[in-house]
Image (spheres, rainbow, N blue to C red):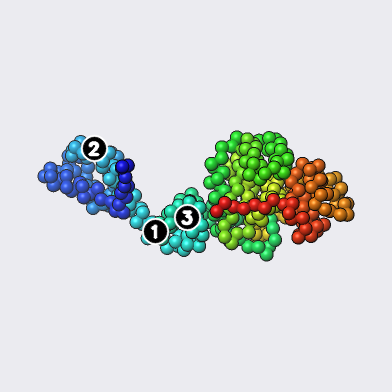
Amino acid sequence: MSEITYKWTPDYAIPPGWLLEEYLEVRGYSQAEFARRCGRSPKLISEIIAGKAPIELGTALQFEKVLGLSAGVWVNIESIYRLQLAKEAEAKKVGADAEWARSVLISELVERGCFSCPESDVDLVSKLLTFFCVASSDAWKTEYSYANVAYRHAPKFRSDEKVIATWLRLGEIEAERQECAPYNKGQFQKAVRRIRSLTHEPIEIALKRAERLCNEAGVAVALVKPQQKMALSGAAWWLSPRKAIIQLTARHKTDDHLWFSFFHEAAHILLHSKKAVFVDGSNGSNGSDTEQESEANKWASKLLIPEAAWNEITQVSALSAKVVKAFAKEQGIAPGIVVGRLQHEGILAWSHLNDLKVRLEWDS
């Protein structure tokens, strides 16, 4: 039978002054005599016993010599006591942070295994702040400010700021897991072109190879399931000057949308500022840099289907499945990408040739 170990974490701490009083009583020292023996003022000893003054390192060493109890013990008791006081003070201020915390989709984070179900408001705030790696809701607002976020898609879709921030944090956690070489623009350009030729392979294999190629060039690829009430397809941003992130949702659940989002975000990494966070999501009219988004769209479109080849396919009068498949094979890309582009440009009806697209599903 295996041995079970229980971790005991009390929600209180013993003031060091209590222990000091016990030791003085055992030794028969008055506070004044003990102060003389330590070479400290009676006022300091009185304040330590009352919990008003901390036991500093030098004082702990003096206590060790006079009372025979290790300085480490005094320092440890003092540290635990002060930490507990700080926790109690923080708990009293939890009101505003709790209101902020309750507005985040906690159930989804628990379901994803980010942390266990909170037992109280204090526990909720603590777990959420730890998840975001910030010390307060004010710090969260500063860290996840959307002053530098650019959006790309229809304004009719709306994604809550907290939902976007949570999804980006999930991507950051995944990106931190991936070991990447320092970013190399030339190598990433080569990787992107090689990934283009992977689009016609089975999606699971293609994504794994794409991740490896990007990692070797200093770019993490995070495929993160979208949260409820979130209308995002992808994002591009920098974890550090040496590591970029391409984050995808596969929200539309077809290979053409997934791959176009990947190459669109790759364009942001290659062409645009390292200081901005480019989110392919809602609020297209809120701070969107349309010039940069348009540039990324054009770059991705021309990479996937070069202009000359695009002009060729658009001249075909009868766009059958056979014609599209042959064209895609000639270009070395997935036929679904061709169908998606033709539909987006209004050349093909949205209801036509969708069976050439690969349907994607998230594992439950």
Up the image or down, 333 lies above or below 186; here it is below
Instruction: From the top left corner, tell me how far across and down residue 314 is, in percent.
Output: 85, 52
**Residue with the mark numbered 3:** 110
Q: Is mark 1 on a helix, strand or loop?
A: loop
Q: Nearer the viewer, residue 90 or 253?
A: 253
Q: Distance between the residues labelled 3 and 1?
A: 12 Å
N-term-proximal mark, 2 vs 1: 2
Closer to viewer: mark 2 or mark 3: 3
What residue appears at the point 34 percent right and 49 percent down from the top-left corner?
A: 83
Q: Is residue 295 left or right of residue 159?
A: right
What residue appears at the point 86 percent right and 54 percent down from the top-left corner?
A: 318
What residue appears at the point 18 percent right and 39 percent down from the top-left corner?
A: 67
**Residue with the mark numbered 2:** 70
**Residue with the mark numbered 1:** 119
Give the residue type at disc 2: Ser
Q: What element carries label 2?
A: loop
Q: What element carries label 3?
A: helix
Up the image or down, 91 lies above or below 312; here it is below
Instruction: From the top left corner, tell me how far across and down residue 68 is, in percent.
Output: 19, 37
Q: In this view, does 350 lie to the left or right of 236?
A: right
Instruction: From the top left corner, tell me how far across and down residue 237 is, in percent.
Output: 62, 47
The answer to whether any part of residue 49 appears in the image is: yes
Give the residue type at disc 1: Glu
Density class for disc 3 (Cα within 10 Å; few <14, some 14-19, many ≥20) is few
Are circles 3 and 1 on residues that touch, CB within 8 Å? no
Closer to viewer: mark 2 or mark 1: 1
Give the residue type at disc 3: Val
N-term-proximal mark, 2 vs 3: 2
Closer to viewer: mark 3 or mark 1: 3
Are circles 2 and 3 on residues that touch, CB within 8 Å? no
Instruction: From the top left corner, tell me how far across and down residue 185 is, in percent.
Output: 68, 37
